[in-house]
Amino acid sequence: MTESNSSNQPKAVTQGGDAVRAVDGKPFERVMDTRLVLSVVATGVMSFSGVVVETAMNVTFPTLMREFSVSTSTVQWMTTAYLLVLAVIMPVSSYLNKRFRTKRIFQVAMLFYISGILCGANAISFPMLLCGRILEGVGTGIALPLMFNVIQEQAPLDRMGLMMGIGSLVCALAPAVGPSLGGWIAESFGWRWIFWCLLPVLVVAFAIGSFSLRQSHPTRKGKLDARGWVLLALSFVCLVLATSEAGSLGWASPVVWVGLALFAAFQVAFVRHERGCGQPLLHLEVLRRRGYRLSLTSIMLLQFTCLGLSFLLPNYSQLVMGTGSTEAGSILLLGCVVGAVMSPISGKLLDRLGARVPILTGCVSSLLSVVLLATFSANLHTAAAMGIYVLFALGQGLGVGTMMTNGLSKLPMQLRSDGNAIITTMQQLSGAVGTSVVTTIVNSFQEGASDVAASTMAGTRVAYVLLVVVMAAELAAQIGVFAGRKDQSAQA
């Protein structure tokens, strides 16, 4: 198998089941060594930092509104703009991976992110703070797919599950650290120190990555499919804006429906363009692989539920149970830690037992957790909510990395960067949609209600029922992965 479509590229051979590729005239063999681990850590730091800043800054929204004299709808652009940039940048990651050297991509991404950190730390106006957030989004949008590309291309096949688990650990740990760390730093030193504290970590990661990153595939020249990128970017912008507006205007709003219609139109135009393009932005034939397609669906449904619960549980805790923000935030903390710890463990289980056991166990665990929430939503207290969320996070930790690894294994090596780009992009979009959908459900019950606690409880119960359906669909998709016919081996 070749790493490129070019006929003059050297072919790979195999030794002990691991591909040995010729890069720059020298053989490249998958090896589990310190440089590989450092490469994953260095690329993961930006992804980790991006989520930490996002969740930490959410705690400071009231402070930012007072300091910069902006409204709630305006300050929410800190999150919306970041998600938009991620959605626009991530689809280009496949092209960047094929066209440029891995180390150069990393260094450019890191420079974008550090620039954003400095811009945010020194912001004298809200637009300047927002500009910094956009620069951080560019860096994270490049770095997150890069980390998984490095693992897919360089990790030994018998350690693939473990390394993907470590990569998932980097991403899963951030939501656990962000809210509590951000609240403490903002309260003790001021919100600007959230940025300053990350700066030395990023500088060290830049040095580590510049030393440890290796080139594992030959690069090739090619033009960026600019038209396809614009069509895809416009569709994502319409989707994110429509779902964001749905949270305040409701799903029946003409603005929301126009946005969704434009999203669909741009998606159709993108697919038609890609089918007739000689050098497409993304090779959509990856979606013809049944195992990959169902794995992508499961990952999206899980992310939809994860972000939905991240809104529902703290909101319910404060408005129905009458807790403070600190206690409400603690409901998610233990679960996030458990999910993060389970990520590398699930990778080891995948390497030893295969994908079926950890994935199906995780799906059942996540489904059971939302069933419990829907059943006992009227009688929840903090300890019970925390325990149920730990059950969900256990399933998430077992599922995300293993489903991603198993799905990508259904693709030929030369298409895995495309598959990776699609997964990371759709994760961001499904999370944004999940938050908007559950927010709209709760808001619809709260509007005009005299008893906020009772209306919030009723709306939250309906949202939980929806999440039960979503998690049941995730389980059904994964049963389909293992029960259906196998895709042609991508590693034969």
Image: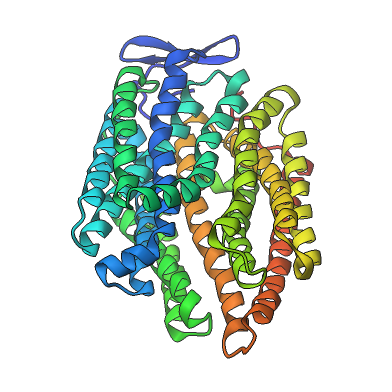
Compare residues 14 and 449 and report the one nearer the observer: 449
The answer to which image quadrant residue 245 occupies is bottom left
Residue 382, position as x, y percentages in the image = 69, 58
Task: Give the farthest residue toward the front.
Answer: 188
Residue at the image point whose x is 48% and y is 58% from the top: 429
Residue 369, position as x, y percentages in the image = 75, 54
Residue at the image point whose x is 33% and y is 71% from the top: 74
The answer to which image quadrant residue 164 occupies is top right
Residue 275, position as x, y percentages in the image = 43, 53
Q: How is the image coloured?
A: rainbow
Marks counted in the figure total: 0
Residue at the image point whose x is 27% and y is 49% from the top: 135
In the figure, is residue 372 to the left or right of 12? right
Compare residues 89 and 309 and report the one nearer the observer: 309
In the figure, is residue 142 to the left or right of 20? left
Examine the rendered structure and indicate whether residue 445 appears above or below residue 421: below
The answer to which image quadrant residue 208 occupies is top left
Residue 340, position as x, y percentages in the image = 59, 37
Residue 365 visible in the shown view: yes
Residue at the image point whose x is 44% and y is 48% from the top: 184
Residue 4 visible in the shown view: no
**Which image quarter is the C terminus in?**
top right
